[in-house]
Image (cartoon, rainbow, N blue to C red):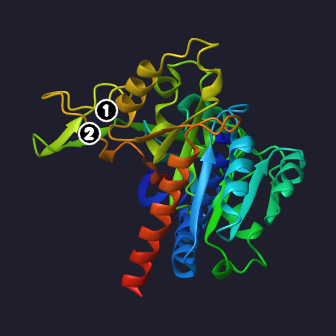
């Protein structure tokens, strides 16, 4: 369970950014979370609440956009959405492919602030 | 008067700090000409026995060292000390994985140019270590024959983050009716093209092929480093 330390990094990052915006109040943090990031959404949400306690971010929301896995299919020569992370092959032609284009994201994309 | 909330773009990787340190470590390993190999697995799959065997086999011909991660005990370092190579324990406390900063701190005072191989044993856990790059050149994921053939399907993320799968405790395969074909199929399903080794630290099965693999990787990474220098 490493979601708490990740939540703390998110809070820290958001705090730095809000300071850059003149101590603006953070209402929400928008996060992109890949299906292959190794982070569990539910655990991260409850850890986030804990990590926010007694910080200027207390009461803010973590809004998570889940990013599905997209692989590169060498046969179709293009990106393809993976059907299941238990089966790394092109959903159209069935060619196995280990090349992950998206799905490892763990990225703070934006802050919703009130000045 | 309250103003409307506004959206400020950030676009920053949460593990940016870890990734920066991991990249610096990778550069350091390359410049020093050392091959860094990490081991991840569930608790009890035989990481320490495998590492002990690795160190014993390599140390007559190569300069080898190891870092071992553990939550609370220094037993592993004591056990590995028998192989007579430098071993340092990283105690993570309650943290369930190693991160790049822990590796960097543990290497403090070590001259990497004096090494050919550095092994890093992660905490026994198939979930959390997958998020953290340690700067290693190769990540081995270990899976013992007693664990169940569907483990790769249950933990696709860690298998996806690793380079080589090692099936351990092969001497017990018959006793537990291990279905090797099913495991190989499951590994290839979550990581097509993944290299798979099968070993027994007890009987020595597969160790020759494993050493050959390590030596090949070591010399090719050296050749790559020499070409880029």
Q: Mark 1 points at which residue?
A: A88
Quadrant housing the C terminus of chain B: bottom left
Dot 1: what SS?
A: loop
| Residue neighbourhood size for the residue with mark 2, other residues' Cα within 10 Å, grouped as few (<14), some (14–19), many (≥20) | many
Callouts 2 and 1 close, C-beta under 8 Å: yes
Residue drawn at (20%, 27%) of the image = A91
Find residue A80 and report its horizontal and vertical position in percent: 20, 37
Q: Residue furthest left?
A: A76
Q: Nearer the viewer, residue B109 or B174?
A: B174
**Do marks 2 and 1 share a subunit?**
yes
Between B33 and A89, the one nearer to me in the picture: B33
Give percent across and percent down for residue B32: 58, 80
At 63% from the left edge and 35% from the top edge, which residue is drawn?
A: B200
Q: Which residue is under mark 2? A: A97
Closer to us: A29 or B79: B79
Instruction: Locate residue B73, reporting x and y percent.
Output: 89, 45
Q: Is residue B148 visible?
A: yes
Question: Measured along the vertical axis of the image, is residue A71 above or below residue A91?
Answer: below
Q: Of the numbered discs in the image, which one, if any, rests on residue B200?
A: none
**Residue B1 in view, yes or no:** no
Q: What chain letter is assigned to the residue under label 2?
A: A
């Amino acid at each position: 369970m490493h979601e708490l330390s990740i939540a703390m990094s998110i809070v820290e990052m958001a705090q730095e950014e809000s300071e850059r915006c003149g101590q603006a109040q953070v209402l929400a943090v928008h996060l992109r979370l890949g299906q292959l990031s190794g982070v569990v959404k539910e655990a991260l949400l409850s850890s986030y609440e804990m990590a926010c306690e007694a910080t200027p971010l207390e009461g803010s929301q973590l809004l998570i956009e889940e990013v599905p896995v997209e692989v590169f299919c060498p046969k179709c020569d293009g990106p393809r959405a993976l059907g299941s992370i238990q089966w790394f092959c092109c959903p159209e032609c069935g060619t196995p492919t280990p090349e992950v284009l998206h799905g490892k994201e763990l990225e703070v994309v934006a802050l919703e602030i009130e000045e | 008067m309250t103003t409307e909330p506004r959206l400020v773009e950030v676009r920053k990787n949460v593990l940016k700090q870890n990734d920066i340190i991991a990249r610096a470590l990778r550069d350091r390993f390359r410049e020093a000409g050392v091959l860094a190999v990490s081991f991840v697995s569930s608790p009890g799959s035989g990481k320490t026995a495998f590492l002990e065997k690795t160190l014993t086999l390599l140390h007559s011909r190569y300069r080898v060292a190891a870092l071992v991660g553990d939550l609370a005990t220094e037993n592993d370092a004591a056990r590995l000390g028998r192989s007579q190579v430098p071993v340092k324990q990283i105690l993570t406390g309650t943290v369930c994985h190693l991160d790049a900063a822990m590796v960097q701190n543990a290497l403090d005072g070590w001259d990497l140019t004096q090494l050919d191989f550095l092994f890093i044993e992660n905490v026994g856990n198939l979930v959390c270590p997958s998020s953290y790059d340690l700067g290693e050149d190769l990540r081995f994921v270990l899976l013992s024959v007693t664990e169940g053939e569907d483990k790769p399907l249950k933990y696709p993320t860690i298998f996806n983050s690793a380079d080589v799968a090692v099936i351990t405790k092969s001497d017990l395969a018959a006793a537990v009716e291990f279905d090797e074909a099913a495991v190989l199929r499951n590994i290839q399903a979550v990581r097509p093209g993944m290299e798979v080794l099968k070993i027994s630290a007890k009987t020595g099965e597969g160790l020759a092929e494993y050493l050959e693999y390590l030596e090949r990787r070591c010399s090719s990474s050296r050749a790559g480093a020499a070409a880029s220098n």
